[in-house]
Amino acid sequence: MSGAAPTSRRALLQAAGAATLLAACKPRWSDAQDTAHIQGSFTGIQQERGHRLRDTKAWPAPAVSHTTRVLIAGGGVAGLSAARALRLRGVQDFALLELEDEAGGNARGGAVAGIACPLGAHYLPVPGDDLPDVQDLLQELGLRRRVAGRWEIDERHLCHSPQERLFMNGAWQEGLLPMQDVGADTLAQYRRFASLVNDARKAATWRIPAARTPHTPFKQALATLTLERYLNQQGLTDPHLRWYLDYCCRDDYGAGMGTVSAWAGMHYFASRHGFHVPGQETAEREGLLTWPEGNGWLTRRMAEPLGERLHTGQLVLRVEQGKHGVAVDAFNTRTQQVERWQAEQVIVALPLFVAARVLQNSPGFLRERAARTVYAPWLVANIHIARPLNDRPGPAPSWDNVLYGDAQTAPGLGYVDAMHQSLHPVPGATVLTYYRALGGVAGGPGAGRAQLMEQPWETWRDGIVRELSAAHPDLASKATRMDITRYGHAMAIPVPDAQGRGGQMPPAHGRIRFAHSDWAGYSVFEEAFAAGHAAGQA
């Protein structure tokens, strides 16, 4: 991230972009403006399927029976990774059950008006040597290859520059750390937090996946308090720093720094690129792999080799371990019948709250962890834009575009541009993928979940257009469609935990193994992939 532009450069930009500035200074979108032409719907998740597990009191007896050596319950990244590990070991007799019509979980992709876009997770940091399993996946998919004795990433899949920008004080700036017109006190607090991150990296080892590093007393002390409380203890009160750290927590964990633990807040920086004050970077930051459909590019390719072993539209109802195997009952949403699977081994790659419900005579560690796990609801809106938007002064449109503001003016996390990776020489129609985490709304995640499910699509549409129109007043006139995906339990929030951070994967339970990012409390691709890979190998 770079610093604020000097005054002469800013004046030059304003003079050169006078026409753009005039267009951008038109009155902001208001409730009175007609948005009826923006069509769309809720899409991507079949909410009623999962709710049937909660609401149905009794299910009919199984009408169909199947047998397999290994059954995987759950087709998110962890389940797909487990299936890949089985294939690599030569185990071909397995089946994977997935609730939705496509595997991938929170890392699926879609399309609006023929333009591919993400329905959830949208990038993967280039993995280092701490993640050999993910490196192997990239090599298998042709993204990583050895050239002249060195490993190289196919640059066509790296995020193009410019990567990110922030809308603040009526203009855009490079990078997401607020730098426009900030004073010496703010910069001093930036440097102070950078020192704390550096000290944390010296005091302990921070890696992804978290289970591969020891949980030290230093980490445990951070795990018992919120990041907000930790900042208070350190005297870090600057509003710009706090906005940025709150944004990072909402972006990675689904809730703000008043909810997320200080361990998670430090892990965000210490496990990857550190915290750098613009102008003081000491090393090049890692690259990002991204695609128009986000991480759906990865999950679709992980699912392709499964063929008929992938069974979608399957609601897992019951998992019961017996003396000679494991019985799994699942409701087939296509045939409307309950089917029974008999397996020698089962990998449960389901969210903890679901696993605890369906596993009969579940072990105490599963029930205890499920009871302590708090989930963040999320909303993802894909907005089709017929023509390029007028832009405000500052850096050019980027892949990641974020608006600075409080919970009322800018409650979202900004948007990514699906066509940013395109090599088309003339900008045209695109899809903006907008994200909002609702784990930190007033009343907590439960209130956010209720808001997510009860608020009409039209209300969401108008609120999102109103928010983004601060930076793009012409958004309403150029948007044609908005498809919204709702995740009621998108990710486990790493809240303060006096009993331990919980990053360690659980032991096997007889013939049952577990694989899901919930166990790490950190819902990222690398954590889910590592959990599934370990379960599949075991």
Image (cartoon, rainbow, N blue to C red):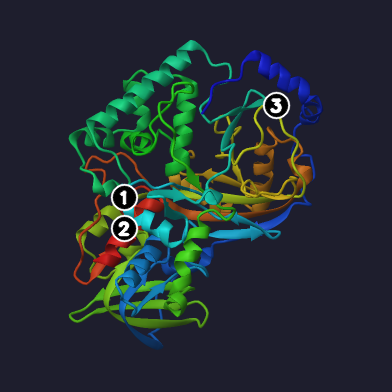
**Residue type, numbered disc 1:** Ala
**Residue type, numbered disc 3:** Pro
Alpha carbon of mark 3 to alpha carbon of mark 2: how far? 45 Å
Q: Residue at x 43, y 25 (%)?
A: 281
**Residue type, numbered disc 2:** Ala
Residue marked by disc 2: 531
Residue marked by disc 3: 393
Q: Nearer the viewer, mark 1 or mark 2?
A: 2
Residue marked by disc 1: 520
Q: Earlier in the sequence, mark 3 or mark 2?
A: 3
Alpha carbon of mark 1 to alpha carbon of mark 2: how far? 9 Å
Residue contact at pointers 1 and 2, CB within 8 angstroms: yes
Q: Earlier in the sequence, mark 1 or mark 3?
A: 3
**Residue furthest out toward the front:** 148
Q: Residue at x 20, y 66 (%)?
A: 509
| 266 is higher (above) or lower (below) than 503 | above
